[in-house]
Image: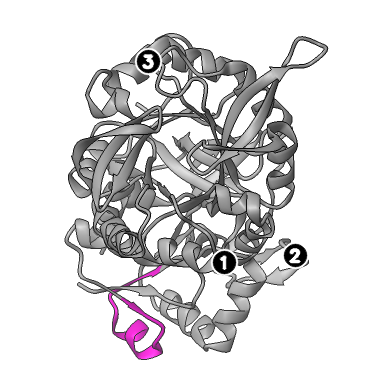
Amino acid sequence: MLAKRIIPCLDVKDGRVVKGVNFVGLRDAGDIVDNAKYYNSCGADEVCFLDITATHEGRKTFALQVERAAKELFVPLTVGGGIGTVDDFRTMLLAGADKVSVNSAAVKNPKLVSDAAEKFGSQCVVVAIDAKRVGINGRGEGIFHVFVHGGRIDTGIDVFDWACEVADRGAGEILLTSMDADGTKCGFDNELTGKVANMLSIPVIASGGAGAPSHFLDTFNAGADAALAATLFHFRQLEILDLKKYLRDNGVEVRL
Amino acid sequence: MMITVIDYKMGNLHSVMNALSFIGAEATVSSDIADLRRADKLILPGVGAFPDAMAALEASGLKDEIIAECRDGKPLLGICLGMQLLFEESLEFGRTKGLGLIPGRVIPIDAKGLKIPHMGWNSLTHHCSDKLIDGVADGDYVYFVHSFRADTTDEYIISSSHYGEKIPAIVKALDMNVRGAQFHPEKSHDTGLKMFRNFADIK
């Protein structure tokens, strides 16, 4: 049986790992290659690097750092941040990434998802969706909109419609971040995650809100195929191996 | 001992090279027939569609050379699509002839409602012993990404996984030093690195 995946995410700025709390207030958490080595050895099933550098120079530094980190990583590597064109996909894949995640640029130009999937295969196209609860419908269910540019701009697009569209366009996976839960450590938004995971035939990675082992158990039970966290792992508040033992003891299949 | 990773422009070879360099194996990437002849061992990687891959191998003359080297006893490891190419034919996008080094064909996974592709970490069940899986325990996890699978008989299957149905994970030829892995050893952490070490040690 397929194991549920635990994915540490590293925000990278100018080649250094940082982590935003509610997307502002960055704290330095070290060198990208050291982090790659650490997560490779401690039970991560996959590692995600998110480039939050805004400059062209910074992006070039990021690609070089990805190349260095890939030499130390023998689990799949997903990279994202500032991906805007098919050429950006190629640059990252050649640097050693296995999957590339695209966010705002896909909203602006949905064809990018189909073009990248056709060119490199669906397995390496991850669409990242930043979702925020904007209301409640007549049936008492949450209404969620897609936000872009680090969660600052409401596109007005319904998250469930968007998830279906990118899946139809050939996305291989959805990285679904709840803007409401992110940074709270109160648990993943499982109404959001469960609904997207159960309506799609591609894997969904739950993101935002992880604070305790039970949060991972809940989101896997809700239907998530993988779960991502950043601060929790960076600051060693939770060791991945301990988390996996807890999940296994609670009937979740994990790679141990 | 020199391993040549065969480059036929299907997918990224960096990860395989990173893994080989990490275990200290001497390896080169090449599409040159002379390099394949000189090599002690061959790795046939590959990501993409079966018909494109066979067309690329035929156009470059690599197909006949690979078959000749394998018949000559040279060890070869196929990875992912490279493993599927070892079989007689594939039904991906029509019907395409493969290298024909292992009896069987390549067909779509019947995942019985599970998500396709079969992507992620799945566990191995061993059916026989083999040098490639020395030190790899029954139940060890490896990383898969694929939508098609080998359809062959048990005698050619070293290990399998389960995803809706039995998925041949490691296969072998009976009369040649040819093996294939459906998963990505280069992304399968210590278990995958162990298999590369075992492959490097195969005589």
Question: Residue A71 location, x and y as percent?
Answer: 25, 56
Write down the chain letter for disc 2: B
Please tell me the numbered disc located at residue B93: 2
In this rendering, do the residues under marks 1 and 3 share a single chain?
A: no
Which range is magenta? B29-43
CA gap, disc 1 and disc 3: 45 Å
Element under disc 1? loop
Amino acid at pointer 3: Gly
Query: Where A71 sits versus A193, above or below?
Result: below
Horizontal and vertical percent position of residue B125: 46, 34
Where's the N terminus of chain B, which quadrant?
A: bottom left
Q: Confirm or deny contact between disc 1 and disc 3 (CB under 8 A).
A: no
- For badge 1, the amino acid type reads Leu
Dot placed on the residue nearer the N-terminal end, 1 or 2: 1
A165 over A26 or under it: above or below? below
User: Disc 2 versus disc 3: distance between alpha carbons?
Assistant: 46 Å
Answer left or right for B196 relative to B163: left
Q: Which residue is mark 1?
A: B85
Residue closest to the eye, B45 or B86? B45
> Is the Cβ of the residue at disc 2 closer than 8 Å to that at disc 3?
no
Query: Please, which chain is the residue tagged with disc 1 on?
Result: B
In the image, is residue A118 part of the stretch drawn in magenta?
A: no
Marks 2 and 3 belong to one chain: no
At label 3, counting other C-alpha atoms closer than 10 Å, the crowd grade (few under 14, some 14-19, many 20 or more) is many
Q: Secondary structure at mark 3?
A: loop
Label 1 neighbour load within 10 Å: few <14, some 14-19, many 20+: many
